[in-house]
Amino acid sequence: MKGTSIPDDVRRFIVTSVPSIPHLEGLLLLRDGTVPAWNADILARRLYIGTRQAADLIEALHHGGFLAPIEDASGNYRYEPSHPSLREIVDKLAQAYQADLIGITNLVHSASSKKVQQFADAFKWRRD
């Protein structure tokens, strides 16, 4: 089955803001709303990643404006984008992911591969 075209704004969001598949799936999982309060332990179990990686992911999503802490001192977070445009782009990302899982996944991998290569290229020994 041939993938659909990924909207340009979704493509741009992935390239600039989605560094990994766990980041993508974590964001979409939190957006889903089936679990009202998230912490690193819950997210780690759901994504099959380590608790430290899940905690880092929650922290990144919080600083990115996608999550808000729950005010009960539990250390839990909820999906609450800080701006309507963030909610809109994540909604569009969810639709695109559902329509073209392989295309979105390939885009995340290619974007992260390019960033890794650019980082590595910065350290290449060059003769003058």
Image (cartoon, rainbow, N blue to C red):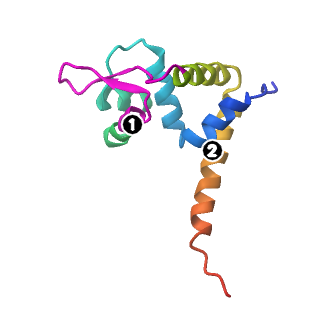
Magenta residues, as a range? 57-84
User: Which residue is drawn at the image coordinates 59% and 24% (left, top)?
Assistant: 89
Q: Secondary structure at mark 1?
A: helix
Place residue 73 in its image quadrant: top left
Residue 102 is at least partly visible in this image: no
Measured as percent of width and height from the top left, residue 25 is found at 51, 29
Which element is circle 2 on? helix
x and y percent of residue 60 in the render?
40, 39
> Which disc number belongs to residue 109?
2
Residue 50 x, y percent position in the rendering: 35, 40
Q: Amino acid at mark 2?
A: His
Label 1: which residue?
63
Q: Quadrant of the N terminus?
A: top right
Q: Is residue 38 magenta?
A: no
- Residue furthest to the bottom: 128
Mark 1 Cα within 10 Å, few/some/many (few <14, many 20+)?
few
